[in-house]
Image (spheres, coloured by chain):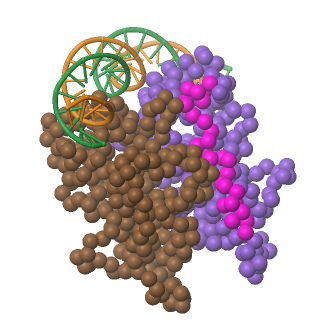
Chain colours: A purple, B brown, C orange, D green
Amino acid sequence: MADGSGRTQSPVVAKLSHFGPLSDEDVRALDALCSREERFEAGAEIVREGATPRSAFVLTHGMACRYRLLPSGERQILAFLLPGDVCDLHVCLLRTMDHSIGALVQTRLAAIEWNTTIALLARHPRVAAALWWSALQEEAIQRERIVALGRRNARGRLAYLLCELVWRQIAIGQSDDHAIQLPLTQIELADTLGLTSVHVNRIVQEFRRNQLISLEKRRLALLDVKRLQEIAGLNQDYLHLGGAPEEVVRHFDQLERDRAGADLPYGGGRD
Amino acid sequence: MADGSGRTQSPVVAKLSHFGPLSDEDVRALDALCSREERFEAGAEIVREGATPRSAFVLTHGMACRYRLLPSGERQILAFLLPGDVCDLHVCLLRTMDHSIGALVQTRLAAIEWNTTIALLARHPRVAAALWWSALQEEAIQRERIVALGRRNARGRLAYLLCELVWRQIAIGQSDDHAIQLPLTQIELADTLGLTSVHVNRIVQEFRRNQLISLEKRRLALLDVKRLQEIAGLNQDYLHLGGAPEEVVRHFDQLERDRAGADLPYGGGRD
DNA sequence: CGATCTGTTGATATCCTTCAATTTTGGTGG
DNA sequence: CCACCAAAATTGAAGGATATCAACAGATCG
């Protein structure tokens, strides 16, 4: 299995390892995906609503978000993309994008060609499964957002979002003390939570007063995770970080072993 | 291509045909999925939060919903499942369900075994792609719900939901005049829209007064779709009913033709 | 034909928005 | 380093949308 070693994992590997242990070869295949990177400045539009989907990508550095602009000029942020997120692997089946993607800070991402995707999925079934798992996680995150917007008040919503962002950063090895870089303005928080920035501001200050968080200079620390969770009415389970059921993991291990014998001819030593 | 004929399509076929034209063999494969049906009474729990995911299923008759119960006892309905919806094909990768599924009326569904799924996807690449497309549609529906809950007022939310339900019924051939059976109580509408049933009631009545809808005896008719869309700030595009891009459809046609030659030995004539 | 769930109505309370400053922060050029 | 500017954060006052509470009417169902 990969990485008992001290070597720092890439965020993709860290993230997908939550599905189950990846082999060294899996890790190599994933790292190979992220070789050619494109760079986007803060505020840049990565994908525009209405455009024809081009290729999938892995976000390697920075932070981005999916969002919709409404006729009224309002914006709803739909999701945040963090390092290690593999985006829109399948979206080529759609004629047009129904939302935009924008960089929140300077962001780097690696485009993945259609062919690369197909080859990867065929040759590395365990990676394919892990990617599928990560798509399920993304859906679970969307469900949690619906719950938050539908049934929680401003405090609950903010607490929920801050927990999620911190937990996801922890899951990709970018934080171990419940403190993260948070490049979001209160306006962006508001556009995510279905609130106004004025009201977000008031709740942020209340949280600060109550020693729940500290937030200054774009650095967020959760000072009382337990109480924040209570306010959010939330626990970490929805991120499904516990990994896949054993029998599934074993199934893919077996598949991989079978394949290893079958096609050494081409899958083997190159690179 | 299937169904220039007058024969009524099954909802699954009707739905997936929006991806692109299906072959007669595709249609047969899909119909075969729905042979053994289970029946659930109104109010029955089909899947319980916390349970281990068992098998995927196709909803063939009736209506169901995904929902979460909060500690406070409140309920948030996450999504509606209509006939033709293929649910949780991939969810076996998760250890536990993070939400429940319940029948809203008497409902029938056909379970799909793991093996059946794998065989189907392998033998019918176009069906596999269509299923993938339908998963994308489901995600798009979730995004639209986030927009509705985050940025629209009660009128906008209700208008949006009613449009969606009608459009989806039209897409599966269960309505052609913007009128449908709507087995939902105002409580259920409220639990979907993040409102109270009292307030939903007031908006429903306002819509009735303004000749936007008629809703009685569980029958809903949209009387002024154009104005409802304006109120919702919505158009039908997000359902991606226009189908996949031509080159994708052609790609899968080609794949299917290739396969047809390759494995007549076993894929062929048996029912 | 009573019991229970759903729909309806009114009065009041609350959360959040809106509007309108003002202060603080961060970035940029001189 | 300072001057300047724009964007973000902060504050207060007032208004509006939706929730809450409570009661009752109507429907549905065994």
Name the side, left or right, on which A186 lies relative to A94. Answer: right
x and y percentages locating residue A161 in the rendered image: 55, 35
Residue A63 within the magenta-colored segment of the rendering? no
Q: Which residues are magenta?
A: A227-254
Q: Which quadrant would residue B188 be assigned to in this image?
A: top left
- Work out whether C22 lies above or below A113: above
Indicate the quadrant where residue A249 lies. Answer: bottom right
The N terminus of chain B sits in image quarter: bottom left
Q: Is residue B43 left or right of residue B174?
A: right
Question: Can residue B207 be seen here?
Answer: yes
Counting from the top left corner in percent of width and height, residue B101 is at: 46, 48
Which quarter of the image is occupied by the C terminus of chain B? bottom left
The x and y percentages for residue B201 are 25, 33
Above-or-below relation of C18 to A32: above
Name the main secondary structure of what is drawn in magenta: helix
Please tell me which residue is depicted at 45% across the width and 47% down the height of the picture: B45
Name above or below for residue A232 compared with residue A244: above
In the image: residue A257, left or right of residue D23 = right
